[in-house]
Image (spheres, rainbow, N blue to C red):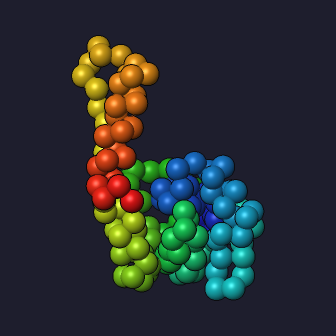
């Protein structure tokens, strides 16, 4: 196999969750080679460098091997080289730090009542703005 569609490759190496999301990214101009924006049907070859804009991050991948079927993450990893700059990778880490896990209720407790919901909201407001600002 010498060539493969770019949307199919992006999906098969797990850069996008589904092929339709990869196709939409191509159609919306979020996948390019240099300044050239790619259509989903662009035939990708080994050695090309893709610039992908995904969820506010600018990712850069070099194509090492071509796949046309989705494989596990461990098998997909050797198929590309991630050339994304360190500061772009740190942008994700900075965004992610401080994000708390969602609250959990004990099993069988059901949804909070209106009164409990107000108490939870009041607690969060006090916790997030302790100065009353």
Figure check: 121 above or below 17: above
Where residue 117 sits: x, y (%)?
40, 28
Where residue 108 sits: x, y (%)?
29, 14
Quadrant of the snapshot with the C terminus: bottom left
Where residue 76 sits: x, y (%)?
41, 59
Q: Residue furthest top?
A: 108
Q: Quadrant of residue 129?
A: bottom left
Q: Disc count in the image?
A: 0
Q: Residue at x 39, y 38 (%)?
A: 121
Q: Is residue 126 left or right of residue 20?
A: left
Q: Quadrant of residue 34?
A: bottom right
Figure check: 19 above or below 15: above
Q: Quadrant of residue 6?
A: bottom right
Q: Residue at x 64, y 80 (%)?
A: 33
Is 73 in front, or is 116? 116
Q: Residue at x 40, y 30 (%)?
A: 118
Figure check: 25 above or below 50: above
Q: Is residue 11 left or right of residue 64?
A: right
Q: Residue at x 35, y 70 (%)?
A: 94
- Residue 26 in view (yes/no): yes
- Residue 100 in view (yes/no): no
Q: Residue furthest bottom?
A: 34
Quadrant of the snapshot with the N terminus: bottom right
Figure check: 45 above or below 77: below
Q: Residue furthest left?
A: 106
Where residue 106 sits: x, y (%)?
24, 22
Is 99 in front, or is 47? 99
Is 10 in front, or is 130? 130
């Amino acid at each position: 196999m010498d060539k493969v569609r770019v949307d199919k490759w992006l999906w098969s190496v797990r850069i996008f969750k589904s092929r339709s999301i990869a196709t939409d990214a191509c159609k919306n101009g979020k996948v390019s080679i240099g300044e050239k924006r790619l259509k989903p049907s662009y035939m990708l070859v080994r050695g090309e460098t893709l610039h992908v804009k995904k969820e506010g991050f600018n990712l850069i991948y070099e194509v090492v091997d071509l796949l046309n079927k989705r494989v596990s993450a461990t098998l997909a990893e050797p198929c590309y080289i991630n050339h994304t700059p360190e500061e772009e990778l740190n942008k994700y880490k900075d965004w992610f730090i401080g994000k708390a896990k969602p609250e959990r209720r004990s099993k069988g407790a059901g949804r909070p009542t209106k009164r409990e919901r107000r108490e939870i909201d009041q607690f969060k407001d006090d916790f997030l703005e302790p100065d009353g600002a």
